[in-house]
Amino acid sequence: MTKAVIVFSMGGPAGSSDVYPFLYRLFQDKAIMRIPAPFRQILARVLARRRTPEAQKIYALMGGGSPILAQTQAQANALARALGASYHCFVGMSYSAPFIEEAVCAALKENPDELIMLPLYPQYSTTTTASGFAAIEKEIKKQKSTVRVKQICSYQTNDGFIEALCEAARPVITEAETYGAPCILFSAHGLPVHIVKAGDPYPQQCAQTAQASCQKLACEGTLCFQSRVGPLPWIKPATDDEIRCAAQAKRPIVVIPIAFVSEHAETLVELEQTYRVMAKAEGCPFFGVAPTVQTHPRFIEGLVQLVRTC
């Protein structure tokens, strides 16, 4: 039996000229912008134009583009090797090439007996996981395929994921402890409050990841949320507020990204650069950011378990 695995994520611009198209696709996604289609597309153009110059500056600090495609492909390759010859892995992105639709078409050409949807979002959200599922299902229907489909919805406390997360964080925590008792922050991308009130389980699942990590690390920590934009209220506490408070108390700080499994602008620029500068300006004696799990062997083992048992 041949099985196809669609490994999908948000994606990211490969270069400066890709920033506007990436942002436009992001904002015109009805899972992100929950207004009727004609108005959503108009607003998406306005927001993308407005935010492109600043986003281009952010990606310039990362060498011009996002590393997510290379890291996602490495994850898919590692997963394919671990799963064996009966599984074929295909990478698809929601807002940049290679698109989810392309991945589905490539997978269906292999005539698989089963197609498994694997989000690279450990915690489920209607804005990310559900949006990717919908794109995959739409393309399968478009291709008139009758392939059996399975979903891996979330893995916020999967043993492999948690162990990889904690192993990546331990060296940073050990270094921080030489400066005093560290403030450990489990940071996740935020969501507008209205999306959570509509029933999105993402904050609760982030809390489960943070709790499992605290147990594994035998530490106390605070869950917080980063990357808020716009005038709408976002879920709290905010990562930058927690960093500022700990820095003013002269505590060493360790930030552990728990909702990203590869490096993004949110980790390489927002956490590593913007928040680091802010923490140092407030008197923080040590500021460390744990790396994302990427192709950590335990993370890949966790994904293998999820795929084989779904």
Image: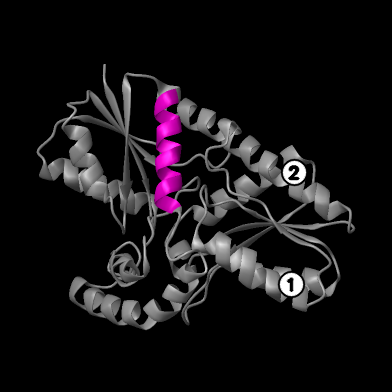
Please tell me whether residue 59 is drawn above or below residue 94 in the rendered image: below
**Residue at disc 1, secondary structure:** helix
How crowded pointer 1 is (Cα within 10 Å; few <14, some 14-19, many 20+) is rated as many
Disc on res. 279: 1
Range covered by the magenta-colored residues: 68-81
Please tell me whether residue 57 is drawn above or below residue 88 in the rendered image: below
- Residue lying at 75% horizontally and 41% vertically, measured from the top left: 217
Residue 130 percent coordinates (x, y): 35, 50
User: What residue did someone put label 2 on?
Assistant: 170
Q: Is residue 309 visible?
A: no
The quadrant holding residue 166 is top right
Q: Amino acid at mark 2?
A: Arg
Could you tell me how many numbered marks the image carries?
A: 2
Q: Amino acid at mark 1?
A: Ala
The quadrant holding residue 161 is top right
Q: Quadrant of the C terminus?
A: top left
